[in-house]
């Protein structure tokens, strides 16, 4: 407790504990009426080393006790000891609570022995407790039955004498309701007053209110650890934070009363003393965090000294006629009295109490906060009266405010001009490719384009259409950034694969322009990292495209390295370069180096702004170095996060071919009858559905997300589109809205594992032609495909057994990554991501005849969807077990083959 008398407890703790250790052997008799009895005053206390174990049963207890050494003194900084008590229940009650109260310890394990059984119960900071904001365990003691209760206390500290009682369950539950209500009110007073004064500070800029808010925040944080708030509400327990708030309290309190009592004007020397006391107290913070026992001593000493000096200053200012000081003095007394009562009780200077002494201290702190609020209000009243004279300066304030408004208006005009420049750039950027698209399209329709020139004309139309699509995507990303809705999806990704994608898309274009292009890896580098591969490619494509656009001769290079746990990717060019002023505004939205830049080189001025925003969301940033006429270097710095799968490679030889190999499908013996677009993010599902469609005689284009599906619809014409609903980058519903916007009239079927009727109805209302449920029912699947393509389909669509087994083996071999993903999501309680993973597993497992996995995933999917998280760990364990068995079964079959 943050009062000066606690420091004396250090001198008497050993005496108290030694007396308890040598108490005569007694037994506790439970009878009515009920009386408070501390088991430490009745039982025997023994040393407990790391190797000491509990007796196994009732018969071993006496033998076990004979081998134990009495616990002679308590260690202030840490320790372990056993408390052995014999109890006989002579009351008619049977439901009790074993309650270690008025204490904060790491772990308390109790075992209740009868001749027939042994029951273990646990409490303490590192254990999930049974009662809200209280330690204790509910126990069952039969009337007229004898018990041995052996309790092991473990902690990094023993601040005050530990008390352990047995209380009737009904009385205990009633008591903790009252205590929790009082605790909630006290914390509520502190939080509400702190927030209220913070809001007043924001409006008035009176620093007194800010320091009051900081002081209340500190004591709320400090006391919350003694009432188990962090571990009860957030599952976080740390003994190292118990004295952090109390060690900070002298500094925040000093800053507060210096301004409240106007010490800078009245007593400047008191200001220096107060600040030094606060700073000295704060210097002990690292040691309070590292050593909680030292924190007890330090906080007791510095808070006592600070309180004494603060009380002296308050009385001094009151005697000088400063009226708010009276509330300040009352506040200090209100906090000191209950804390001193608690300290005297702990020191045995007052009789032992069954009350919650920490609660008294909290009530005192709440009264302190309330009275200090009165002091602040009184000071505010006095200040308001003084400010009447300041109204004479109103004209000057108005002029100042007018000037500020003029500045804001100028900024708005600049923003408006920037938007106007952006619209002009966009008009140019869109009209230029649209001129080519419309011109060549008219030429083809009117016959002006000769047959042998049509391929070139179509190529020009396609290239310019993709350019327009890129502009639209940039505008959409910019809108998401402004609405703070631009999202990234962090997944385990192959780093070299993502970078090779940039090489494959732009490397040839750079070389065709007559420039040198080099991709330099500075080893060692990780092969797999946690990142959003799509957004990483978007950033690198943008930086590399800019380099190619502004470079006419010389070289473009990409350097990849790791340094200080950061991933560094640098794109260098030998282009036109930039001035220092141009670099300052480079990442602003709609920015171009000058008004002629967009005319000469093209661009909307959004690319670098979007790239920087994406880099920030990936725990990184983009830095630029440039010199006019000598080129530019953009460095993308990202947080480096590896996984269990990560392997650090030392050379190009270890990388291998990072590009994905696409197997050419087997020859189709019958003529193709339709073009189908399949958008499915799960690779195994995609392969299986694609092969089924190909056996129906259809030509299939498979993509992995909604954005690629929209691009495919813009590039080609399809007779039927199968669109998965849940996909990364752009989901099925978003992709469908874009496809509709293009004027596409092709039937679109929703492919989803959501089979609830209201979900199906919603898809149909959105405009989907139909839906297909996952896992695929091949008969229904073939009937719907045949209906929309107006073709006849053979009834037998099953894949050859060998081909299906090969696809299934690929699916099973990929379950290991999903197991790791599920474990990580469960560990960090990311239930939203876990729900998506389980939903995907549910839709895929049955398609490959993994029925056990499908059943468990289906049940788990329903629970996660309805946010029913009870017993979810058990079902997760069952799901992981089923997936592991599937992997082992697949390995056995592979070995047999």
Image (cartoon, grey):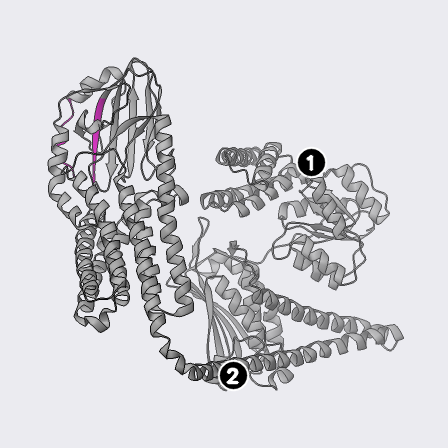
Q: Position of residue 729 (x, y in %)?
A: 61, 57
* Label 2 sits on residue: 406
Q: Nearer the viewer, residue 592 or 561?
A: 592
User: Along the horizontal axis of the image, is 19 left or right of 61?
Assistant: left
Magenta residues span: 67-85
Residue in view at x 25 percent, y 62 percent: 325
Taking the magenta stretch, the answer to whether it contains residue 676 is: no
Residue in view at x 52 percent, y 45 percent: 831
| Quarter where residue 892 is shown | top right
Q: How many numbered marks appear?
A: 2
Q: Is residue 594 visible?
A: yes
Q: Position of residue 279 (x, y in %)?
A: 22, 63
| Quarter where residue 840 is shown | top right
Q: Which mark is residue 801?
A: 1
* Magenta stretch secondary structure, dominant: loop
Q: Nearer the viewer, residue 751 or 694?
A: 751
> Is the residue marked by circle 2 packed among few (<14), some (14-19), or many (20+) residues within 10 Å?
few
Q: Position of residue 124 (x, y in %)?
A: 31, 36
Q: Position of residue 711 (x, y in %)?
A: 70, 62
User: Along the horizontal axis of the image, is 799 left or right of 559?
Assistant: right
Q: Is residue 797 visible?
A: no
> Is the residue marked by circle 1 packed among few (<14), some (14-19), or many (20+) residues within 10 Å?
few
User: Along the horizontal axis of the image, is 37 left or right of 452?
Assistant: left
Give the mark, 1 or 2, whose residue is nearer the N terminus: 2
Secondary structure category for the residue under label 1 = helix
- Give the label, 1 or 2, closer to the camera: 2
Taking the magenta stretch, the answer to whether it contains residue 72 is: yes
- Location of the C terminus (image quadrant): top right
């Amino acid at each position: 407790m943050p009062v000066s008398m606690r420091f004396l407890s250090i001198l008497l703790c050993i005496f108290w504990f030694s007396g308890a250790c040598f108490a005569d052997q007694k037994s506790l008799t439970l009878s009515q009426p009920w009386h408070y009895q501390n088991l430490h005053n009745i039982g025997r206390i023994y040393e407990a080393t790391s190797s000491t174990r509990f007796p196994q049963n009732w018969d071993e207890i006496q033998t076990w006790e004979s081998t134990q050494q009495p616990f002679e003194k308590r260690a202030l900084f840490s320790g372990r000891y056993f408390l052995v008590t014999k109890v006989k229940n002579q009351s008619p009650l049977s439901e009790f609570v074993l309650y270690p109260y008025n204490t904060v310890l790491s772990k308390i394990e109790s075992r209740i022995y009868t001749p027939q059984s042994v029951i273990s119960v646990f409490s303490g900071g590192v254990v999930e407790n049974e009662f809200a904001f209280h330690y204790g365990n509910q126990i069952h003691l039969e009337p007229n039955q004898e018990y041995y209760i052996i309790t092991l206390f473990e902690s990094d500290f023993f601040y005050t004498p530990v008390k352990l009682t047995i209380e009737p369950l009904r009385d205990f539950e009633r008591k903790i309701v009252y205590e929790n209500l009082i605790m909630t009110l006290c914390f509520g007073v502190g939080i509400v007053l702190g927030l209220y004064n913070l809001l007043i500070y924001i409006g008035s800029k009176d620093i007194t209110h800010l320091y009051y808010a900081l002081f209340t925040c500190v004591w709320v944080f400090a006391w919350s650890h003694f009432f188990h708030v962090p571990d009860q509400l957030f599952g976080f327990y740390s003994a190292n934070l118990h004295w952090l708030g109390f060690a900070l309290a002298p500094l925040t309190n000093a800053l507060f009363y210096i301004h409240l009592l106007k010490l800078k004007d009245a007593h400047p020397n008191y200001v220096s003393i107060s600040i030094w006391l606060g700073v000295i107290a704060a210097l002990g913070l690292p040691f309070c965090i590292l050593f909680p026992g030292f924190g007890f001593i330090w906080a007791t000493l510095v808070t006592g000294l600070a309180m004494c000096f603060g009380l002296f200053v308050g009385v001094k200012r009151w005697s000088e006629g400063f009226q708010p000081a009276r509330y300040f003095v009352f506040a200090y007394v209100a906090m000191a009295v209950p804390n001193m009562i608690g300290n005297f009780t702990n020191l045995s200077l007052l009789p032992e109490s069954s009350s919650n002494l920490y609660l008294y201290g909290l009530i005192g702190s709440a009264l302190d906060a309330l009275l200090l609020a009165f002091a602040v209000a009184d000071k505010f009243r006095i200040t308001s009266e003084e400010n009447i004279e300041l109204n004479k300066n109103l004209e000057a304030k108005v002029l100042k405010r007018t000037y500020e408004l003029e500045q804001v208006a100028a900024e708005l005009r600049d923003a408006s001009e920037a938007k106007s420049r952006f619209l002009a750039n966009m008009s140019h950027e869109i009209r230029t490719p649209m001129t080519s698209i419309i011109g060549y399209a008219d030429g083809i329709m009117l016959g002006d384009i000769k047959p042998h020139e049509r391929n070139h004309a179509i190529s020009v139309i396609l290239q310019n259409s993709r350019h327009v699509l890129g502009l639209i995507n940039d505008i959409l990303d910019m809108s998401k950034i402004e609405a703070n809705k631009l999202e990234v999806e962090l997944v385990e990704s192959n780093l070299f694969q993502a970078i090779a994608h940039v090489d494959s898309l732009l490397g040839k274009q750079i070389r065709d322009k007559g420039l040198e292009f080099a991709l330099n890896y500075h080893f060692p580098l990780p092969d797999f990292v946690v990142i959003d591969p799509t957004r990483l490619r978007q950033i690198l494509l943008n930086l590399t495209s800019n380099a190619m656009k502004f470079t006419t001769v010389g070289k473009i290079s990409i350097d990849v390295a790791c340094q200080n746990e950061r991933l560094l990717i640098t794109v260098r060019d030998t282009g036109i370069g930039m001035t220092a002023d141009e670099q300052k505004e480079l990442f602003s939205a709609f920015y171009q180096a000058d008004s002629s830049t967009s005319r000469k080189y093209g661009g909307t001025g959004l690319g670098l702004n979007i790239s920087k925003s994406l880099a920030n969301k990936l725990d990184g940033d983009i830095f630029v170095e440039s010199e006019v006429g000598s080129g530019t270097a953009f460095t993308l710095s990202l947080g480096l996060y590896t996984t269990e799968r990560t392997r650090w490679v030392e050379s190009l030889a270890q990388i291998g071919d990072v590009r994905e190999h696409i197997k050419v499908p087997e020859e189709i013996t019958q003529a193709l009858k339709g073009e189908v677009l399949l958008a499915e993010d799960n690779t195994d599902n995609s392969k299986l559905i694609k092969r089924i469609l190909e056996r129906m005689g259809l030509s299939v284009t498979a993509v992995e997300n909604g954005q690629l599906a929209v691009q495919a619809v813009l590039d080609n014409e399809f007779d039927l589109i199968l669109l998965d609903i849940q996909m990364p980058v752009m989901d099925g519903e978003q992709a469908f809205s874009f496809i509709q916007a293009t004027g596409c009239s092709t039937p679109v079927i929703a492919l989803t594992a959501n089979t609830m009727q209201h979900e199906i109805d919603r898809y149909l209302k959105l405009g989907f032609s139909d839906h297909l449920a996952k896992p695929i029912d091949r008969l229904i699947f073939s009937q719907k495909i045949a209906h929309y393509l107006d073709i006849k389909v053979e009834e037998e669509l099953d894949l050859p057994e060998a081909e299906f087994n090969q696809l299934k083996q690929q699916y099973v071999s990929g379950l290991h990554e999903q197991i790791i993903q599920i474990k990580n999501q469960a560990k960090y309680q990311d239930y939203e991501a876990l729900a998506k993973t389980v939903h995907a597993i549910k839709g895929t497992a049955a398609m490959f005849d993994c029925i056990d996995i499908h059943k468990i995933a289906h049940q788990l999917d329903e629970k996660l969807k309805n946010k029913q998280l009870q017993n979810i760990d058990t079902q997760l364990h069952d799901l992981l077990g089923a997936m592991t068995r599937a992997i082992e079964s697949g390995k056995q079959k592979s070995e047999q083959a």
